[in-house]
Image (tube, grey):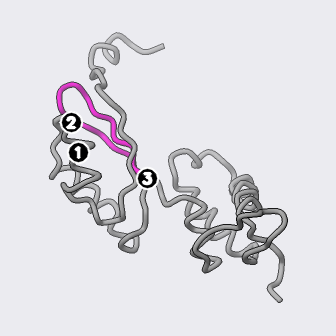
Amino acid sequence: MASLKEILTRRPISATIRLTVPAGGARPAPPVGPALGQYRLNLMAFCKDFNARTQKYKPDTPMAVTITAFKDNTFEFTVKSPSVTWYLKKAAGIESGSGRSGHVVVATLTPKHIYEIAKVKQSDPYCQYMSLESICKSIIGTANSMGIKVQDELD
């Protein structure tokens, strides 16, 4: 149960905004500008903070960001690492997955690729309490649904 102090200091939320923004590429132009502008949030503060947090990633890496806008025109945001599908496509060197997964294999990856993706995804807020093994199993399931085969050795 929350204490009385926590309840009184809680700020009322006006919106939760979800965007996909390229790493280091937040600018006041669309899609960021209109999304934040309608809630009267400080665009430049968001852009500077987001770009600083994502500078370790290669430019144009799609980053999922969740912004919580408060009624007093302040905000907080969390940045997630790129999606598993994006990593799988990069590792396999393909533009898109199979149109007929389960029938057509478009690429093959090794367990080492899966492990490396899982290590990156483990830092995500939603995966931090999952074991590395369960993250790997989830990634293998995503790979299978994209038509990417995971096998011990490449031919």
Q: CA distance from mark 1 to mark 2?
A: 6 Å
Name the residue beneath numbered marker 1: 34
Q: Amino acid at mark 3?
A: Ala
Which SS class for mark 3? strand
Residue 64, labelled with which disc? 3
Residue 2, horizontal then vertical, whole percent:
43, 15
Say if 9 sits above or below 139 in the image: above
Q: Residue at x 33, y 35 (%)?
A: 68
Question: Magenta segment, which residues?
Answer: 64-78
Q: Amino acid at mark 1?
A: Pro
- Asked if residue 106 lies in the magenta stretch, the reply is no
Q: CA distance from mark 1 to mark 3?
A: 17 Å
10 Å crowding of disc 2: few (<14), some (14-19), many (20+): few
Disc 1 to disc 2: CB gap under 8 Å: yes
Q: Residue at x 66, y 67 (%)?
A: 97
Q: Quadrant of the C terminus?
A: bottom right
Q: Residue furthest top?
A: 4
